[in-house]
Amino acid sequence: MVEPSKAEPFAGYDDSDLPSGTTYSRGKVRDIFDLDDELIISTSDRISAFDQILGVVPFKGEVLNRLSVFWLEHTNDILPNHHVATLSPRSIVATKCQVIPIEVVVRGYLTGSAWRDYQARRPVSGISLPEGMRFNERFPEPIITPSTKEADGMHDVPCSREDILASGVVDEELWTQVEGAALALFARGQRVVAERGLILVDTKYEFGIADDTLHLIDEIHTPDSSRFWYADTYDSLFAAGEKQRKLDKEYLRQWLMEQSYTGDGAPPEIPDEIFAEVSRRYQTAFETITGREFRTQSSGVEAEKRKLLSFLEERQDDGE
Ligand SMILES: Nc1ncnc2c1ncn2[C@@H]1O[C@H](COP(=O)(O)OP(=O)(O)OP(=O)(O)O)[C@@H](O)[C@H]1O
Ligand SMILES: [Mg+2]
């Protein structure tokens, strides 16, 4: 664990950092540079809650990027992924893929929005679940509850296998391959974190196509894309019908809700100590999942920027 105040948080790239004419795009968390057949994906320290960017969390980008790289290395026997090289602690060179515009959510337990749908007797992404299931109960087998990936500012919409095939965005053969990969990745994730005393409860994957081959893209099994519970207290809390102990990144969201903020209007001023606590929780997630102490590998924001810029320049020279 590194003291959060030791970091120099990085809100990401903007035009003033870059040679004019550099093409890049900004997601909520990542800055993406297009190198024709490859991308540089740089994970900033930006944090979003209620679909808005609310500030920067020390070490968040490095934690997320290094965790994803850890998982990509632990799953590349299941299917190819986009990782080509690690450029800096927060950035990778990735194969540019044609993104399949579906968030492939896999759930091992009845919780979150699936629990809310179930209680309201709504099918969960077109799947009818057995009667009489309880809060946080384990499914006999993990289920896939996809949503469409919507443009900025729009909420993703849950959809069923039938909706996906009917829409024609993916054909049946490819979708079947996606489902198989998602379930195999989830099983691997559950097995790896079980050794660390955790349960991988649910997660979201993204896939893309390059060279006519299905690739895993984006982030994998990070606190931003996944829910983790502590395994040792699962049974007793489940039996008591209580909330699970989680490895969470929801601290900021929770704090905002305590200030009566739920996403409407201007957010309240967020004290540095709140961001510091979020940082400690991200670092704890890294340490618990990987079993390694978190020590930063960054030599600072300026050094990272220089590295990325010189890589961009090299590529531009090659292209000329
Ligand atoms: N190898 C890849 N090829 C093409 N696009 C990719 C690849 N890896 C990731 N992406 C895309 O890059 C974006 C990652 O950026 P980021 O996570 O910041 O944004 P976001 O997905 O818009 O926001 P959020 O994750 O908060 O919903 C995603 O849109 C993802 O689909
Ligand atoms: Mg994303």
Image (cartoon, rainbow, N blue to C red):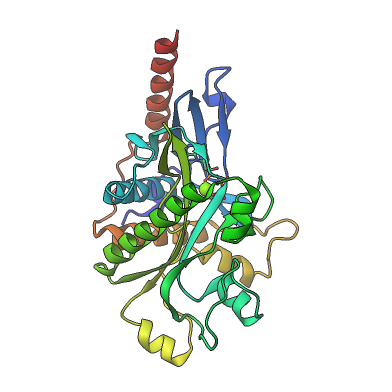
- Vertical comparison of 257 with 172: above or below: below
Judged from this view, the residue extending furthest toward the right is 265
Q: Is residue 158 visible?
A: yes
Q: Residue at x 60, y 78 (%)?
A: 118
> What count of labels does the image hold?
0
Q: Quadrant of residue 307?
A: top left
| Residue 8 position in % (x across, y down) | 43, 42
Judged from this view, the residue extending furthest toward the bottom is 240
Q: Does residue 237 appear left or right of residue 271 in this picture?
A: left
Q: Residue at x 39, y 53 (%)?
A: 181
Q: Does residue 222 appear left or right of residue 74 in this picture?
A: right
Q: Is residue 221 visible?
A: no
Judged from this view, the residue extending furthest toward the front is 173
| Residue 94 position in % (x across, y down) | 40, 34
The quadrant of the image that shows the C terminus is top left
Q: Residue at x 43, y 59 (%)?
A: 223
Q: Residue at x 28, y 72 (%)?
A: 197
| Residue 107 position in % (x across, y down) | 46, 67
Q: Quadrant of residue 22?
A: top right
- Vertical comparison of 252 with 41: above or below: below
| Residue 260 position in % (x across, y down) | 68, 70
Q: Does residue 116 appear left or right of residue 274 in this picture?
A: right
The quadrant of the image that shows the N terminus is bottom left
